[in-house]
Each structure stands twice: as C-alpha cells, then as structure tokens.
Amino acid sequence: MEAAAKEQEILEAVSHLRNCEECRKSLRATSKETRAFFTEMVKGHMSPPLYSIDAYSAALDSVVARLSGESSQLEEERAQAPSLLGEIEGYPLKQQQLIIKNLPRFQRWGFSEYLLEASRSGWTDDPVRSEELALLAFEAANQLKADGFRLKVVNDLKAEAWSYVGNSRRIQSELRAARTAFNRAEEYLSLGTGDALERARMLDLKASLVRQQGDFDNARKLLEYALSVYRASGEKRLEAKALLGFSKLFSDMGEAELRLPLVLRAAELLKDDSDNYLEIVAKLQTINCLIEIDRAAEASARLPELRRLVLEHGSRLNRLRLLWLEGKVRQALGQVELAEEAMKQARDGYANVELGYEVALISLDLAALYLETGRLEEVKQLALEVVPQFAVQQIHGDAFAAIALFEQAARKERATVALVHEVASKVRDCQSRRPPAKS
C-alpha cells in the first residue's frame, strides 16, 4: 500500500507538472540539467514499469538535493568566466580553441554559458566576435564529461552554441555558412533531451535566416511553431521576440499593414521585462511601421521615449538605426534640413563600421530627399561620391550595378524618385544574397 501510494504521489506530481504553468515557471528557473530530467519524465520516457518506486524517489530526492549544490557551483563558474576569457582573448581564435580543449579549468558548464550570453549580447554591435564566442562556447561544451542522460543535456548546450554561430553568420550576411551552422545545431538537438523550448529557440533564430533567404513560407512555419511553444510555456519575452520576427517577415513580404498590431503586442509583453534590447527593437519596429503606413506624426510622437531608451541602453548600431529613422520621420513631415542632417550622420556612422548595404540605402534615401526638393545638382554630387565608396565596400555585384545605374541617370539629370525606390529595392534584395566571407 505504501509503495502504491508513493507511486501515485509521484505520478500525480508529474501530471501536475504537465498542467501547472506556475510550477513549470519554477522548473524553468532551475538548472538546464534538472529541467531536462523532469522533461524526460513528463514526456513519459521514464515510465513506472521500468523504474522502481524507490528508484523514482531516490532520483527525485537526488535532483532536489543537488539543486543548491549545482547552483553554487554554477555561480562560481560564472564568476570566474570573465577572467578566464580575459586570459585567452589576445590569441587568434584557433589558439583560443586549443587552449580550451587542453586546459581543464576552461572546460566548465558555467564558462560555456557565459560565452553564449556574451555572444548573444554582441549580435548587434560585433557579430564577428559573437561568432567566435559561440564557437568557443561549443569547444567548452564539447569537453564536458558526460554520459547517459547528462550527455543529452550537453548536446542541448552544443546545439545552442551552433545556433548562435548560425545567427552571427546570418547577421554578417554569410548565409550559406549560417545554414551549415544551423544544420549542426539540429544534429546536436536531435541527440538532446527533446525539450520543446530548446527546439523553439533554435528554430526561432533559424527563421530569420530562412526569411533572409527569401523562403517566406518556411520562415512563417518556423515562427508559428516557436510562437506556439512560447505561449504554451508562458515565455512572454520569447513570445514578444517571435512576434517581432513575424513583423520583420511581413515587412519583407510587403505587407506593412499587418506589422503594427504585432509590434504593439510585443511592446506590451515587454513592458515589465528587464531585456532592454528587445524593448528597443520593438520600439524601433513600431516607428518604422508607422512611417510605412503614412502615420509620420504618430511616429514622431514616439521618438523622444525611444531616444531616451537607446541613449541609456542601446548599442552603437541601435543609435545609428535611430538616426536613420529620425531622418525618415523628418522627411515625411517635410522637415528637410533635420531629415538631411540625421541621414548624413547615420550614413557616416554605418560607413565607419563598414556596413555597405546600410550606407547604400541611406544614400538612396538622401537622393530621394534631394529629388523631392528639386536639388538636382546635389543628387548628381551624391551619385559621384557614392559609386567610388561602394567599390571598396563588400556588396553584391548586382547591388553595385543598380547603384551604377542610378549614378548614370543622376549625371544626365534623369534620376527620379521612382528610380531611386527601384534601386533601393534591388539593393535590399541583394543584401540577403551576399556570398559568405572566406575563412
């Protein structure tokens, strides 16, 4: 009777976990390994006929008992991680990987997690370094000693590292190399715990790559899967992230009117969140949406709050994006001088960080501004300046050809706003087809 009661108690606990969102939230706050153990139970992989009641109880007691110890160890490893990274940062990437592979003090879960967080934080400002950090995180995870179920948890960590490599490469427009990285991520995930949240996060990142490659249908399917998992898990921040992904997808599909409800809902989900990065993205997208649907006055009213947030918490690229949007808002409101000043500052900033496509697109926005105000000589001068500049930027040959077409039309004073928009569309299309950089 006592054994039967104990079995029933455990099964009720597992059943409760399936249906209680608050308990699942508490579970998500524990270590990845502990969460994965319970995930395996909830999925039914550890069924009562294969495990004695004593084994169940011992397993549960062991997991609970290890929580405080694991937490202390992880905190210690995370505290040591910055100094460990500092020891190797001056070396080339391959040498950093070799050091991690051969020195046990670098082979720590907390160090790998720290590297992944550093990689994620650097996506907007330094995607090249973000890629390197994710590769180092994989190397640290690859050296972890594990077998049995713990090996599955380590494979989840390796999958996360490769998905971060893939996203970093995507941001650099190295799309084929990014797909290779995501393929590696899926391989490790197939050997992992099967945690739905882990899979959703990876596919959420992959959706951005698939969208950038122009496969809108598959991008939508990936985002729909991720969004459903986030909502079922009560992950509001991740739900907001997926909604912002949908917004970007609809923008690329030319369905601007569908974007605004999504970004406003994302902003609502993020209002009490500590992740300033996503809040900034949501507000940037909101203003861009309002510009696209000819609600410039409303966009202008939202600029001061966004400016405060970006100056306090934003990255360098966030600030450049804000300047660009300010220029577009001022242009829509007929404030020509303010628009020109903001766009020039944004263009020069993007040129300093060698983001050729952004430089091209802002230059075209400036050309449209000049054409709208009848400043043909300035359009001609702008065209003469941009072609040599783009010659040294790493942009797709078709994009360069489109810019050259604009330059020829400007020299002959035949450039029109319609032509500028057509060339800008071509540049945006080429932006998603840039060949991978040589390694």
Image (cartoon, rainbow, N blue to C red):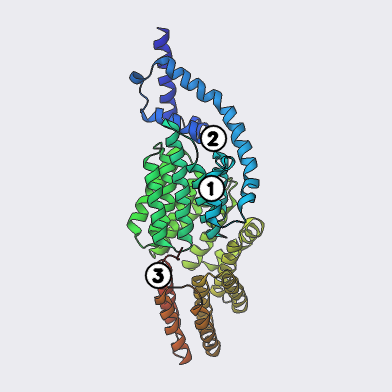
Q: Find residue 338 and report its image quarter.
A: bottom right
Q: Secondary structure at mark 2?
A: loop
* Residue 340, percent from left and from top: 59, 77
Residue at 48% across, 72% down: 394
Tell me the tag on residue 429.
3
Q: Is residue 126 above or below residue 399?
A: above
Q: Find residue 385 and report its image quarter.
A: bottom right
Q: How many marks?
A: 3
Which residue in the protein does label 1 denote? 116
Amino acid at circle 1: Leu
Cβ–Cβ under 8 Å for marks 2 and 3 = no
Cβ–Cβ under 8 Å for marks 1 and 2 = no
Q: Is residue 86 above or below residue 382?
A: above
- Which label sits in the foreground, 3 or 1? 1
- Which label sits in the foreground, 1 or 2? 1
Q: Is residue 10 above or below residue 89?
A: above
* Residue 348, percent from left and from top: 60, 74
* Residue 18, percent from left and from top: 41, 29
Which residue in the protein does label 2 denote? 29
Distance from Cα at disc 1 to Cα at disc 2: 18 Å
Q: Quadrant of the N terminus?
A: top left
Residue 170 appears left or right of 274: left
Mark 1 closeness class: few <14, some 14–19, many ≥20 residues within 10 Å: many
